[in-house]
Image (cartoon, rainbow, N blue to C red):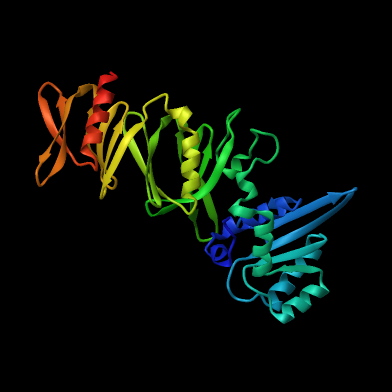
Amino acid sequence: MAKWTLEELLITDPQDFEILLSGLFKSMGYRTEPTQYSRDRGVDIVISIENFGLSHTWLVQAKRYTGSVGVKEVREYSSLRYRDRVDGVIIVTTSTFTREAMQEAAEHNVKLIDGNLLTGMLNHYLPDGQTELSKHDGKRGERSSEEIGSGAILKNGEEIITSEVVLIGNEKFAITITNRNIFLKKESSGLFSKSSRIEERIEVKEMIGLHTEPNKAILITGNKKLKLYPLSSRKLPELIGIFDTLQPEYLRGEHLILSSRNGDRLTILTSKRLVITDISEGMLMEIQNKKIVGAEVTGGFLKKDQLHVLEDSGVVTKHPVDVDDPVKWKDLIGECVRSF
């Protein structure tokens, strides 16, 4: 069972940290309202709860850093209670509070949550690293497009399965997977603000498959031209499992039969074509399965087995193909060709 740790929280993006806190308070029964990032006038989250006609509203300020929170910050945030006419203020930090800060907080109804208490609350209310943002909120099939990114609209019957942070190559993206689409959202920072936008939408039916390796995976999509997305994430096994559940949606079209990687070169056999591509540079060779007229393995004593594929494009051409198991590839290529 995964446990929340201070080390993990300290490397969390500041905006993601606020979203995490919003999910925490929501799981505790509060209604939460994150404020607009970087324009919050000292307020990160507004939480409220109503019981038996009595309503209570609190302002939450998130402090994700290592240094202790001092009396100056507590005094500054305590004034928000009177400015916004709420019941109190909560300061949440990944570090600690000074003794003077705790004394000041007690005098002004400011509640303090330090790093140790925070991890305890997260592990109690959000075990296994799950946040409320990855679960359905409200009626089934109804989700806010803000959880995906600016401009996103979910269609009728479309539901979010998960949202995670991934690295695609060396760039950080938020990936949101629904039962119909895969959204890739990239965050950009300006001098005074931080914004996010949808970089790409991939329809699930455009998926071809997933090439998997230890700690890495390559999402293969495309229609006329294949496109590769090298993925890495601390929750990669869970993402692979989710992609597997989508197979009934994309196996009806072109789909992955076999793949083999040698350095940056990835060889892909689908139900329609054989492709050799460089992960960094792009397509190197593509042969439609209907143009393949043969496959053979050469080698012998003290020689490494080599796969050759014969293509008929008016003239028969023999292409050498470097793969891990040439005999297996030869047999599967034969099955694909016979299916045409």
* Nearest to the observer: residue 305 or residue 241: 305
In this image, 310 relative to 98: left or right?
A: left
Q: Is residue 11 above or below residue 46?
A: below
Name which residue lies at 39% across and 46% down.
Answer: 217
Position in image of residue 133 (x %, y %): 62, 47
Q: Is residue 293 above or below residue 279?
A: above
Q: Residue most toward the bottom?
A: 100
- Is residue 44 visible from the viewing direction of this image? no
What percent of the width, then of the height, locates residue 184? 47, 43
Please state the horizontal and vertical placement of residue 152, each as a whole percent of the image: 55, 38
Identified at 73% across, 55% down, the residue is 46
Q: Residue at x 71, y 51 (%)?
A: 27
Q: Residue furthest front?
A: 301
The image shows a total of numbered marks equal to 0
Tell whether 128 sits left or right of 273. right
Image quarter of residue 267:
top left
User: Residue drawn at (51%, 31%), measured in percent from left and top?
Assistant: 180
Using the image as rendered, state which of residue 48 and residue 307 is in the foreground. 307
Residue 228 drawn above or below residue 194: above
Q: Is residue 160 visible?
A: yes
**Residue in front for this viewpoint, 197 or 215:** 215
Residue 115 position within the rendered picture, expressed as x and y whole percent measured from the top left: 64, 68
Describe residue 5's horizontal placement relative to residue 105 as left or right: left
Whether residue 8 sits left or right of residue 44 in the image: it is left
Which quadrant of the figure contains the N terminus? bottom right
The answer to which image quadrant residue 179 occupies is top right
Q: Where is the C terminus found, in terms of image quarters?
A: top left
